[in-house]
Amino acid sequence: MTDQYRYAVKLLQKEYNEHLSAEQAGRVDQEKQKIEEERKQKEYKNKVETQNKKADQQRMKATSMNTKKPKTVRKKKANIMDLDGDELDKFVDGLIGLN
């Protein structure tokens, strides 16, 4: 009779251990899924950040804030009254288009 009890206890322990291992396997699978999801989210965030950085760099290149404005040099206006002889002839020829 005790052998039957021992056999029954062994069967119950075996079933219990199988049940625990199944629960643990389920927990492990859930943890794996959670870790994989977190990793995917981090990868997505990193990808978005790099794309945003590239877009910002392109935007900065396109803006006029980065480009230097060319300086305009104003020529002094010639005062006709100050011109003498040959200088006056050259000025008049320039106006007429003989140069």
Image (tube, helix red, strand yellow):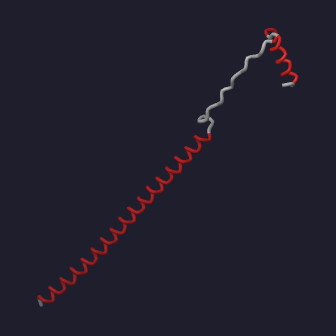
Please give left or right for residue 57 compared with residue 22 in the image.
right
Find the residue positioned furthest to the left. Answer: 2
Q: Residue at x 31, y 75 (%)?
A: 22
Q: Quadrant of residue 34?
A: bottom left
> Residue 94: x, y in percent?
83, 22
78 above or below 9? above
Q: Residue at x 53, y 51 (%)?
A: 51
Please give left or right for residue 62 compared with residue 52 in the image.
right
Question: In front here: 60 or 37?
Answer: 60
Q: Quadrant of residue 61?
A: top right
> Residue 36: x, y in percent?
40, 63
Find the residue positioned furthest to the front. Answer: 86
Picture mark count: 0
Please give left or right for residue 38 compared with residue 20 in the image.
right
> Residue 65: x, y in percent?
60, 34
Question: In front here: 83 or 44?
Answer: 83
Q: Residue at x 30, y 71 (%)?
A: 24
Q: Residue at x 51, y 52 (%)?
A: 48
Image quadrant holding the C terminus, namely top right
Question: In front here: 80 or 87?
Answer: 87
Image quadrant holding the N terminus, namely bottom left
Find the residue positioned furthest to the bottom. Answer: 1
> Residue 66: x, y in percent?
59, 36
